[in-house]
Amino acid sequence: MIIEDLYSRRYKKEHGLFPDVFIYELMPEKLKITLSKIFIRSLEQCDQVDRQHDTDYYEVIHVIICEVHGLKIIGDQFDDFESRITGFFIEEKDIFINLDITNLVLNTLFRVSKINSYLSSKFLSFIQEINQRMLEQGFGYQYEDGLLIRFDSKHTHTEIIKPTLLLLQNKKFSNADAEYRKAFDAYKNGNYEEAIREANNAFESTMKIICHHKNYGLPKKHNATALIAHLRENAFIPDFQMEVFNGLAKSLESVSTIRNQIAGHGTGHEERNIEPSMVSYVLNMTASNIKFLVELADFE
């Protein structure tokens, strides 16, 4: 039996009861276990590079966490500071303490990466690994340029992405919904080309669905540019909004352009290097455009 056919899953999808794309209020236990192992590996490497300071990083973290959160001691059932911090980190449920410990480890890695330019890439790769693990677990925080940020501040999650996902719960848009969620899953797993492809697919599917239910038919070509032109020709946008749509059409087309240039064709002999910032831009742009189109279609 296919899991998607289960009543509970159909009910939750139809009523918008699935959890958000990212979670913010609780760090999953599996993620804490994974991160604690990365903390141990990475801080051990820091110790070897930053010997001149003779610093016990775990003791420093212990002091800061106790001071900031008004605690006398943490993890006193363990014998050393490493075990205290990592053991306490796994058991602790307070999201702010979990985030602060993660932040302090990342700050240490970021600082040490500046000490030794030859080994800088090693410590930056630890940061990238932590970021990637958080993405894979759907945990909505990332560390960038020395700062741990909540992911929705970068993806305008609350204002655009979440409302778009709710709009796509309409059965008519089930295909576009599935494709947009695949785009997010691909992004969380570091598959950036697939993320761009699926985002563009969701965008094109949204326009095809609107054309079908509005009885506009479809243009000869089914790509984004042709679909945009087709919607305009069928006066999908009211006259008083045409000026706005002229500008919007360019932004809509930009999603398709990025997809074609970056992820639409074979790589050939050159390896593509797609920046995560480019993928986040595509996801945001796609969500904003889909939201606009679905709201305008106003299907029951």
Image: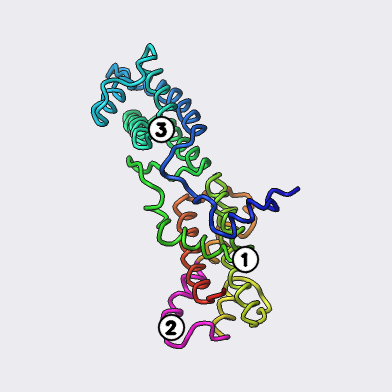
Q: Nearer the viewer, mark 2 or mark 1?
A: 1
Tell me: residue 268, above or below residue 128: below
Q: Residue 12 in the image: state x and y as whole percent.
A: 58, 54
Classify 10 Å Cα crowding around label 3: few (below 14), some (14-19), many (20 and above).
Answer: some
Mark identifier at residue 241: 2
Circle 1 residue: 171
User: Under tag 3, what secondary structure?
Assistant: loop
Looking at the image, can residue 127 be seen? yes
Q: Residue 30 vs residue 5: left or right?
A: left
Q: Quadrant of residue 120?
A: top left
Q: Residues within 10 Å of mark 1 (few under 14, many from 20)?
A: few
Q: CA distance from mark 3 to mark 1?
A: 37 Å
Three-letter amino acid code of the residue under disc 2: Gln
Label 3, on which residue? 93
- The residue type indicated by label 1 comes to Lys
Does residue 170 lie above or below 238 as drawn?
A: above
Q: Earlier in the sequence, mark 3 or mark 2?
A: 3
**Residues at circles 3 and 1 in contact by the CB criterion of under 8 Å:** no
Q: Position of residue 192 (x, y in %)?
A: 55, 50
Q: Earlier in the sequence, mark 2 or mark 1?
A: 1
Query: Which is nearer the N-term, disc 3 or disc 1?
Result: 3
Specify start and end residues of the magenta stretch as a single range: 234-254
Residue at image point 43% right, 83% down? 241
